[in-house]
């Protein structure tokens, strides 16, 4: 029993030591295998590194060769370019040298010519001196022979020539003056007629009243309101007079301000369509119409500029142009008048070769002062000039505004065209209203001016004041004096009177010899 235990223990001990030995041997082998694997990996890595290094060196060498070749090509191109530039410079230097030689030769030639000219000039001067001396000697001899000095002889000849030529000179001047007047009149008339033919516009005459048609007579009572409160509110808010009479289904708005009248008309028409007519509603509609009218004013200004082909106009100036639609002059709509003047200016400027756009701009803005002349003191010319300066208009436009009524001298052709077009637009039949009192006063003033000249027998204003016929006494007034009376009368009318268009002055001198046979 004990022997078997000992054997087991010995076997166990030997097994333990054998396992330990085997484990040691296994670990040694694993270590050796690991070292071999590591050495192999190192060798493989070194081999791969050598291979990569070789490839990199080959790439670097190829890149170096490529860069070298490109540098050589660039150097070659630069050398060729430099050689070409040098050749051009050499050619230019050669041409400059040739030019210098030509200039030098020309200078020498000019010097020679100048010397020849100086010599020739001296020769001519000496001959002129000799000739002057000869003329002086001859003049002295002539004075001795004729017993007249040079001054007395000149005076005598001039006086005799003046006496002989006075009549011929007067007739020549009269003939040329008449010819010039006829030619200028025909050309101007042709130019104006062509411009008026090419631009034609319907006559739109503004009035001081507007009429509104009502759907029924019951609406009159609603507009008047209880105890007249509605009509009082309308008149107070709009600033117009509302006339409600016995005319069926019609009311009349009266005001000298076309803008107020138009706002009142739209307000009342809106109230009629709405049906709610009471003071608060009237004020509400009026405020809304005022805002809409502001937009309409801007639209009217833009349309006027677009119609004339004018661009780059300040927005505030466009608004002022639109307000001209609600201003009148003798019943003529100011905006339509300004557009018409602009069109006529453009047509005449095109015929004369002037700046058409600038002429149209000056024509459109010539009465711009009328758009606010109710708000600022001063004539519409001064106000318009200030407005144009404020918005930096061209000097030609400024002069056209200032000179279109003759207050300032016109400095450009366009300014004269604006004045002509303004007169044409105002003088066109039907363009403006004129009261009977003003008409009669103008005729009386024309006849009074004609009768104020000495030798005038009777003066007749004809053709609605566009022609004046002056009958003179033939025994007191000569033909030459009749021309003088016509001219002086023209100047006096231009100085003392304000009138549209032109006035023709005809001085008539008639002699009659009467005998009666018995």
Image (cartoon, rainbow, N blue to C red):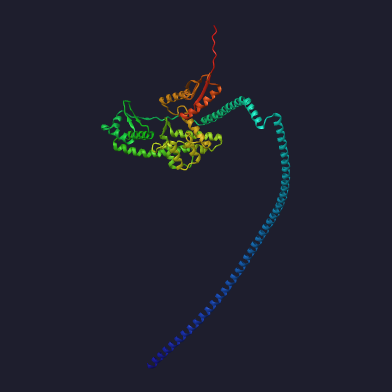
Image quarter hosting the N terminus: bottom left
Q: Can residue 307 be seen here?
A: no
Q: Where is residue 118 in the image (x, y as percent from the top left)?
A: 72, 45
Between residues 226 and 484, which one lies in front from this camera angle?
A: 484
Q: Position of residue 150 (x, y in %)?
A: 67, 32
| Figure quadrant of residue 438 | top left
Q: In this view, does 209 lie above or below 112?
A: above
Between residues 213 and 145, which one lies in front from this camera angle?
A: 145
Residue shown at the point (33%, 31%) measured from the top left: 241
Q: Is residue 122 above or below residue 277?
A: below
Q: Position of residue 174 (x, y in %)?
A: 58, 26
Q: Along the horizontal axis of the image, is 288 left or right of 510? A: left
Q: Position of residue 296 (x, y in %)?
A: 40, 38
Image quarter hosting the C terminus: top right
Q: Along the horizontal axis of the image, is 463 left or right of 71? A: left
Residue shown at the point (63%, 26%) measured from the top left: 165
Considering every residue shown, the one lying at the far bottom of the view is 3
């Amino acid at each position: 029993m004990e022997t078997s235990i000992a054997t087991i223990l010995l076997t166990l001990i030997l097994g333990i030591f054998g396992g330990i030995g085997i484990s040691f041997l296994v670990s040694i082998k694993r270590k050796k295998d690991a070292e071999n694997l590591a050495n192999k990996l190192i060798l493989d890595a070194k081999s791969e590194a050598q291979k990569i290094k070789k490839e990199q060196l080959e790439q670097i060498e190829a890149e170096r060769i490529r860069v070298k070749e490109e540098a050589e090509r660039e150097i070659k191109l630069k050398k060729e370019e430099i050689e070409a530039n040098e050749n051009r410079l050499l050619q230019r230097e050669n041409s400059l040298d040739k030019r210098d030689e030509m200039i030098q030769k020309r200078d020498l030639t000019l010097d020679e010519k100048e010397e020849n000219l100086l010599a020739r000039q001296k020769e001519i001067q000496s001959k002129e001196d000799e000739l002057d001396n000869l003329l002086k000697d001859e003049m002295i001899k002539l004075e001795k022979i004729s017993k007249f000095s040079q001054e007395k002889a000149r005076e005598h000849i001039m006086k005799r020539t003046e006496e002989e030529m006075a009549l011929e000179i007067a007739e020549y001047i009269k003939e040329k003056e008449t010819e010039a007047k006829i030619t200028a009149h025909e050309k101007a008339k042709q130019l104006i007629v062509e411009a008026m033919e090419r631009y034609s516009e319907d006559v739109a005459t503004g009035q001081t009243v507007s009429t509104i048609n009502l759907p029924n007579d019951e609406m009159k009572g609603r507009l008047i309101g209880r105890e007249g409160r509605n009509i009082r509110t309308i008149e107070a808010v709009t600033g117009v007079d509302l006339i409600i009479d016995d005319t069926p289904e019609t009311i009349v708005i009266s005001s000298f301000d076309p803008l107020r009248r138009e706002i009142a008309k739209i307000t009342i028409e809106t109230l009629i369509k709405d049906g709610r007519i009471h003071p608060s509603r009237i004020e509400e509609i009026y405020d809304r119409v005022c805002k809409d009218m502001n937009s309409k004013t801007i639209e009217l200004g833009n349309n006027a500029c677009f119609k004339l082909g004018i661009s780059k106009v300040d927005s505030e100036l466009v608004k002022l142009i639109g307000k001209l639609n609600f201003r009148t002059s003798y019943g003529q709509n100011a905006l339509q008048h300004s557009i018409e003047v602009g069109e006529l200016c453009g047509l005449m400027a095109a015929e004369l070769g002037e700046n058409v756009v600038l002429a149209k701009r000056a024509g459109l803005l010539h009465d711009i002062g009328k758009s606010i002349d109710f708000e600022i003191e001063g004539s519409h010319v001064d106000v318009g000039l200030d407005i144009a300066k404020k918005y930096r208009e061209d000097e030609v436009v400024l002069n056209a505004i200032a000179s279109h009524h003759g207050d300032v001298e016109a400095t450009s052709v366009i300014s004269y065209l604006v004045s002509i077009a303004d007169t044409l637009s105002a003088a066109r039949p039907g363009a403006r209203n004129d009261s009977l009192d003003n008409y009669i006063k103008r005729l009386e003033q024309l006849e009074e001016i004609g009768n104020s000249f000495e030798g005038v027998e009777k003066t007749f204003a004809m053709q609605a004041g566009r022609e004046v016929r002056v009958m003179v006494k033939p025994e007191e007034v000569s033909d030459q004096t009749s021309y003088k009376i016509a001219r002086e009368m023209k100047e006096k009318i231009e100085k003392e009177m304000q009138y549209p268009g032109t006035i023709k002055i005809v001085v008539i001198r008639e002699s009659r010899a009467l005998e009666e046979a018995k």
